[in-house]
Image: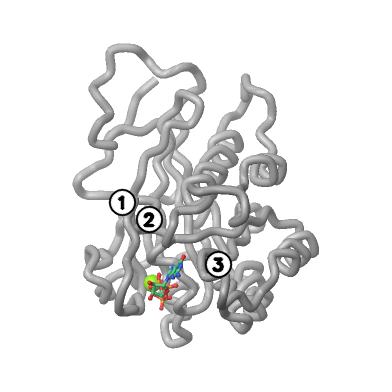
Amino acid sequence: MSRKKTPKTKGASAPAASALPAANGSRPARPGTARPVPQARPNGPPQPGWPSLGGGDFYDVAFKVMLVGDSGVGKTCLLVRFKDGAFLAGTFISTVGIDFRNKVLDVDGMKVKLQIWDTAGQERFRSVTHAYYRDAHALLLLYDVTNKASFDNIQAWLTETQEYAQHDVVLMLLGNKVDSAQERAVKREDGEKLAKEYGLPFMETSAKTGLNVDLAFTAIAKELKQRSMKAPSEPRFRLHDYVKREGRSTSCCIP
Ligand SMILES: Nc1nc2c(ncn2[C@@H]2O[C@H](COP(=O)(O)OP(=O)(O)OP(=O)(O)O)[C@@H](O)[C@H]2O)c(=O)[nH]1
Ligand SMILES: [Mg+2]
């Protein structure tokens, strides 16, 4: 069994479209940085005595996750919340092209690296994002609960997904900005109904408070990890059940 270390210069499988710069002050998107396939190690428990994983450099298996949805729904903020535990308040700076961040999670004793691609929601970048769908192992479809149009557009995003993504891609629907209760324009039940219609796991999130943010990515990591194991020793992970059980609603909790 070998434990992988995030290479300084990464593989060159991503479409060249990632050469577009990011306008949001994060690292510019670089070409050729995506990993094409889950890099599963042979099954088995992690070896003792490996170097400290403090820097998040080492991983057993890696997956590519994409955030998609209309401009302004909070994709970049969700990613920043997950990666850095912070909220990008203030002026909204729309993503240009595509950007990514890596995060390694400990999932039941295995280091799962998520390479998370933050796409631009603006129409003019659509052709850029199309090129990335095919390598994605999971897609998080976001709408903004204060913006009905972003919810109505989810069907169009699903159509794109069907057209460009792998048929077995893991999907999850997220209604973001639930902290803005006064401005809510999409009821939780409507999100649930849409999710049910398409057979998607669903949660409401807030990049501002952090509600359900870690949970959404952890659920995806668990599902992808399990799928990558040829003969899983653990009981089958059920994404829908997990999200239903663990997801919190705005009324019940402080994240
Ligand atoms: N109240 C609240 N505001 C949020 C939340 N998430 C994002 N925002 C705000 O919504 C605006 C848009 O957020 P972004 O994350 O940049 O949106 P995006 O989906 O990445 O937009 P594009 O890059 O254009 O596709 C910003 O002003 C954020 O501060 C949230 O959970 N709650
Ligand atoms: Mg963005």
Instruction: Locate residue 147, reporting x and y percent.
Output: 57, 80
Q: Secondary structure at mark 3?
A: strand
Classify the position of ligand 1 by quadrant: top left, top right, bottom left or bottom right. bottom left
Residue type marked 3: Leu
Disc 3 or disc 1, which is closer to the eye?
1
Residue 81: mark in rendering: 2
Is the CB–ligand 1 distance for label 2 below 8 Å?
Answer: yes
Q: Establish if 40 lies above or below 89.
A: above
The residue sitting at the top extreme is: 48
The tag earlier along the polypeptide, 3 or 2, is 2
Q: Secondary structure at mark 1?
A: helix
Q: Which residue is mark 1?
A: 84
Q: Residue at 61% across / 49% down in the picture?
A: 252
Image quadrant in which the N terminus is located = top left
Rendering quarter of residue 90: bottom left
Q: Establish if 207 lies above or below 143.
A: above
Residue type marked 1: Asp
Residue type marked 2: Arg
Left or right of residue 202: residue 58: left
Q: CA distance from mark 3 to mark 2?
A: 15 Å
